[in-house]
Amino acid sequence: MSNLYRIAVNSFRESVREPVYFLMLLGALLIIGHYPWMTLFVFFEQLKLVVDGAMATTLLFSLAVCVLCATSTVSREMNNGTVLLLLSKPVSRWSFVLGKIAGIAAASLLFCAVCAFASVIAVYIAVDQFRMNLTLYGFFIGVVAISCFFGMAMNYLRSVSFGEFATYAALLLVGGMMAYCLKFQDHPMLSLVDLSKALFLLAPAVLIMAVWAVGCATRLDVVPSMGVCAVLFFLGLVSSYLFQNADGAFWGPIAAVLYAVIPNWQYFWMADAMAVNKSIPTDYVWWCVGYALLYSTVGAAWATVFFLNREAVGDNRN
């Protein structure tokens, strides 16, 4: 277990240190923060568009980050022989795979959490369809800038990773600003409880993709692995339309099997419920969490079995 923990921690830090990680985080935060600007003068639809845009940005960027981190870290170690050096020590293959999954999943969930905090702030910035809270907007842009400057200062003074410490600063500052908005700002015209549930449900989707991305990276190179994950994401978005008819019945036994194998991302997308002010039951949230844990467990077992049977430059260990 100690080896698994060390591999998980190293994988997490390696993922956060990837330059693309913070670039994606910076882009996602700026896009989410500017949704109140882009939705002005839409006549009673501003909050709906802000929530839709912020949730879509959070989900898409988080899924992209977990795939990029998995393919870049795992595939790179497989290609440059680092995995052979690691396996030459008393480290089992299953510890390596599960540690990679845990570390990359933690980094992806951290990314998703920061974007979710920013989504709540964006809802507070959007006052109504004719105006926005410019003070909060200015503070939010300042928080993002301070995170970047903190990473630059730590990189200059201590020669540490700019992206890693800028990410930690963004987590603390954006999270603190969200807490300030919840405590001291007037509540927007929507249910914050349902908004928190909708944003929380994005995390299980990210967890599933992180697990399957690591599984693909143990067998495929960077580009093929990203291609497989992209196809998996697309099929999961339209699986209900591909394998079921209008009455909800499957087209056949093969369609039922494919529907069960491919994760259905629509289970985790609650923007439609938020648009019509429909309450999200707590039981449904826990059902989705269980669904994601089951899928992740199967995906982790699949990744472990695939890696156990792979030769690592003449390595014959199991």
Image (tube, rainbow, N blue to C red):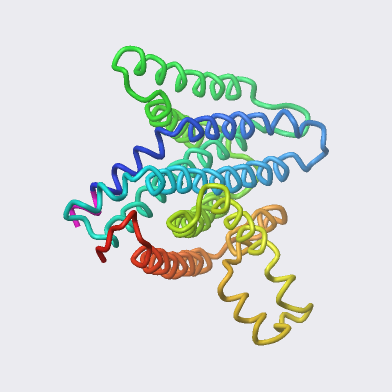
The total of numbered circles placed on residues is 0
Q: What is the x, y in percent for residue 71?
A: 48, 47
Instruction: Give the extent of the magenta segment.
Output: 1-5
Indicate whether residue 2 is drawn in magenta: yes
Locate residue 183 relative to residue 89 in the image: left or right.
right
- Residues 66 and 94: in front is 94
Locate residue 117 relative to residue 137 in the image: left or right.
left
- Residues 91 and 25: in front is 91
Locate residue 222 relative to residue 245 in the image: left or right.
left
The dominant secondary structure in magenta is: helix
The residue sitting at 30% across, 42% down in the picture is 10
- Residues 202 and 254: in front is 254
The residue sitting at 44% across, 66% down in the picture is 299
Quadrant (top left, top right, bottom left, bottom right) of the N terminus: bottom left
Q: What is the x, y in percent for residue 22?
A: 49, 31
Indicate whether residue 122 is drawn in magenta: no
The residue sitting at 41% across, 40% down in the picture is 15
**Snapshot quadrant of residue 110:** top left
Q: What is the x, y in percent for residue 89?
A: 18, 51
Above or below, 318 relative to 72: below
Locate residue 295 relative to residue 13 in the image: left or right.
right
Above or below, 225 relative to 235: above
Q: Extreme bottom residue here?
A: 253
Quadrant (top left, top right, bottom left, bottom right) of the C terminus: bottom left
Q: What is the x, y in percent for residue 246?
A: 79, 77
Above or below, 187 relative to 201: above
Q: Extreme front residue here?
A: 314
